[in-house]
Amino acid sequence: MLKTTRGSEVWLITQPAHAELAGTMAVHWGNEEFKRPGDFAASEDSERLRQEVVLAVAEHDNGWWEWEADPPLSAEDGLPQGLAEVLADPVAGMERWLLGIPRLAEQHPYASLLMSDHAYWLYAVQFDTDPPPEFTHHLQRGRRALYSKELESEARRFLADVREMQGAFQRRLEEDSFWSAALEPEQRNPHARLLQTLDAFSLAICAAAIAPLEGEAKGLGEDHIVFEDVPRRSWEDRVSIELNPAGAGQLVIDPYPFDEAPLTVSVAARVAEPNTSWRQAPRVLKDFTYLRK
């Protein structure tokens, strides 16, 4: 649950809703400057590949479904625990990944593989030796020691479990020439990085770094945000994207990666008050608009 306080209200956005927002942005990713998912390298059916990538982005947090159905409540306000509170138990977070990564694997092993890449790099950038910086999650830049040192043994077990799942996905994909080609670094790497990027875009919105269209305040983050190593036309062609909150839910983004300008996206949030029945709180669509510089 992404939980932010705005005045007397508390916004509650589920992890799957945040992922769905990222998926919406994946649908619109690509224009004359940025390649669409599936087009980063030659493919015999780029649209088929694109749809699989969009699915991976939209479903990357489905391991939270069960948790979100009955979340533990915070003693402080009687509302579901927010992500910061949940991260206090990172081992439970690993269990949610191990639940969610294979959920779609029977029909969509490539989507599951990209989801596993996302989960893997969240921990590998801290606990693997010399991890490539281009797979450091945008929100971990400058703070790669996100987890305590005491977590290392659990993290290494988790990484081994993820690698085992990845091996199973890859063996299935290698049986088909189309998906075998999609495993090549020139396709898989930009798709994995795009998932990280759109996850970070969505978190910036859902975690109150950006205020909604109807809001007066600018939210928690007044300054611009920079997203590095974003694939543009190929894996070798990566750029930094700058996001500047412009007030009232508007975001100026440069360079502009979407197929519509402006582009308005929405996310469902429960708007609750502390120590009230959060399940009865109204669910409201909050809109945000991306603008060209």
Image (tube, rainbow, N blue to C red):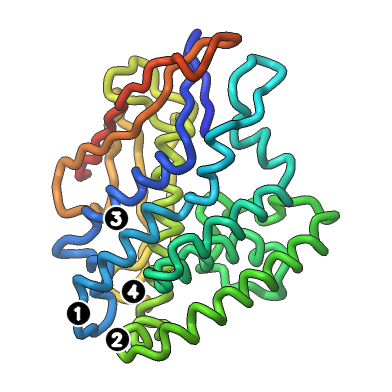
Disc 3 or 4, which lies upstream in sequence?
Answer: 3
Dot placed on the residue nearer the N-terminal end, 1 or 4: 1
Is residue 236 visible in the rendered image? The answer is yes
Q: Which residue is located at x 49 percent, y 78 percent?
A: 169
Q: CA distance from mark 4 to mark 2?
A: 24 Å
Q: Kindly report which numbered mark, 1 or 4, lies closer to the viewer in this rendering.
A: 1
Which image quadrant: the C terminus?
A: top left
Which mark is in front, 3 or 2? 2
**Depicted 46 relative to depicted 53: above or below:** below
The location of residue 160, given as percent across then percent down, is 70, 73
Dot 1 corresponds to which residue? 45
Whether the residues at callouts 2 and 1 have beta carbons within 8 Å, the answer is yes
Q: Quadrant of the N terminus?
A: top right
Is the Cβ of the residue at disc 1 closer than 8 Å to that at disc 4? no
Instruction: Return the residue nearer the eye: 96 or 127.
Output: 96
**Which residue sits furthest right?**
150
| Residue, disc 2 | 178
Q: CA distance from mark 2 to mark 1?
A: 8 Å
Q: Is disc 4 in contact with disc 2, using a CB cutoff of under 8 Å? A: no
Circle 4: residue type: Asp
Residue 111 vertical placement versus 274 (above, below) = below
Q: Where does residue 229 sit, x and y in percent of width and height? A: 43, 64
Tell me: 257 left or right of 118.
left
Calculate the distance from the C-alpha at mark 3 to the C-alpha at mark 1.
18 Å
State the residue position of label 4.
Answer: 237
> Viewer-nearest of labels 3 and 1?
1
Classify 208 as above or below 160.
above
- Is 273 positioned to the left or the right of 287 in the image? right
Q: Position of residue 263 (x, y in %)?
A: 19, 42
How far apart marks 3 and 4 lie (CA) works out to 18 Å
Say whether disc 3 or disc 2 marks the residue closer to the N-terminus.
3
